[in-house]
Image (cartoon, helix red, strand yellow):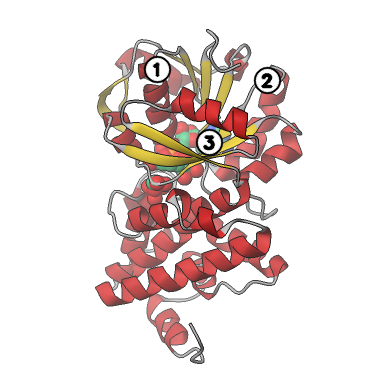
Amino acid sequence: MLNDDRPVAVLGAGAWGTALALLIARGGRAVTLWTRDPAHAAALARDGENRARLPGLALDPRIRPTGRLGDAAGAGLIVAAVPAQGWRGVAGELRPYLGADVPVVLTAKGVERGTGLLPHETTREVLGEVPLALLTGPSFAADVARGLPTAVTLAMPDETTGLALCEALSGPAFRPYWSPDLTGAALGGAAKNVLAIACGIVMGRGFGESARAALTARGFAEIRRLAAALGGEETTLMGLSGLGDVVLTCTSTQSRNYRYGLALGEGQTPAGAADRAGGTVEGAWTAAAICERADRAGVEMPLAATVAQIVEGREDVDSAARRLMSRPLKAE
Ligand SMILES: NC(=O)C1=CN([C@@H]2O[C@H](COP(=O)(O)OP(=O)(O)OC[C@H]3O[C@@H](n4cnc5c(N)ncnc54)[C@H](O)[C@@H]3O)[C@@H](O)[C@H]2O)C=CC1
Ligand SMILES: O=C(CO)COP(=O)(O)O
């Protein structure tokens, strides 16, 4: 299934899809790199690089860009790098082209608006019982594309296929660790984007490093509460896909979510902040969606709810800070 000669289809040719296509192609596999925009596919083929997202990094000759989703038919493995809000539609269009027992590796870090579903839950609704994995954890696209050392989580309940996927996707500088816990891994990846926005806001507003550390720890506590309520494992949250990605994205200006928060903290509008972040800001969409999901599970997420309020222009940063600091004192 995995060690055959069929190509790997990577869906979504943004920063992450392109980086993963490079990783897989360098491992010797042919890659079909699908983008919804045929003009973008033509530009990738013509330029030999993804100029908008990973400029200066040559595409491997084993990568074939395409604008036709039907070219994913015949792939031995699907890697989905489409943002969480767009994945349901793409998964539906993919269904007729998906071979029997072909594993689908999801990589989106978000919660679907309107349904509150994590990417693997959306996928189950659309594609049913396909072999499903989630690749997540601290990994900037540019770092992976440059071949810098990276370790990630590959979550899949089935251990045999999960370990085979770790092997298939590993490289000299790319190390996936298997976990059986899809829910914990997906929740950590989605929620850390919201927390990264909060940390960016705090730094952009000039509240200081102590405030950011407090926010990171209290935000991580609310993520763990929700994960536990949904059946995610504490060990997953304390690993690469939770703590690891929180550390990365809450501290680095390489993160688009963090940059978006920085701009909001500096007083930009949500639209202006999105422009400055550049590219997909999953946390901006996920903030309200994760709160809806938490409400249904009876879990309080005051920090995520505050990010949602600010992103939607319903509260300004200073009044949000005053409100959070005046909450009743309680046990940690
Ligand atoms: N960039 C990174 O370092 C990492 C990103 N991710 C996740 O990967 C996902 C994709 O992010 P990036 O590639 O970085 O974003 P990006 O902004 O660079 O690219 C997103 C791509 O998805 C496409 N797209 C958007 N909506 C679509 C739809 N409805 N149907 C089809 N295609 C659609 C866009 O055309 C674009 O090519 C996000 O969930 C992100 O959280 C995960 C790990 C690392
Ligand atoms: O998920 C990421 C790194 O692990 C990428 O973070 P941003 O989407 O905030 O850039």
Residue 233 is situated, as x and y percent measured from the top left of the image, at 59, 56
| Residue at point 45%, 73% (across, down) | 218
Q: Amino acid at mark 3?
A: Val
| Mark 2 → mark 1, Cα distance in angstroms | 21 Å
| Residue at point 38%, 18% (across, down) | 27
Label 1 secondary element? helix
Label 3 secondary element? loop
| Mark 3 → mark 1, Cα distance in angstroms | 19 Å
Q: In this rendering, would 103 be left or right of 45?
A: right
Q: Which residue is mark 3?
A: 82
Q: In this rendering, would 140 be left or right of 108?
A: left
Which circle marks residue 25 in the picture?
A: 1
Disc on the earlier residue, 3 or 1 = 1
Q: Is mark 3 within 8 Å of ligand 1?
A: yes
| Residue at point 57%, 21% (across, down) | 77
Q: Amino acid at mark 1?
A: Ala
Q: Residue 213's image quarter? A: bottom left
* Residue 205 visible somewhere in the drawing: yes
Q: Which residue is mark 2?
A: 98
Q: Is mark 2 within 8 Å of ligand 1?
A: no
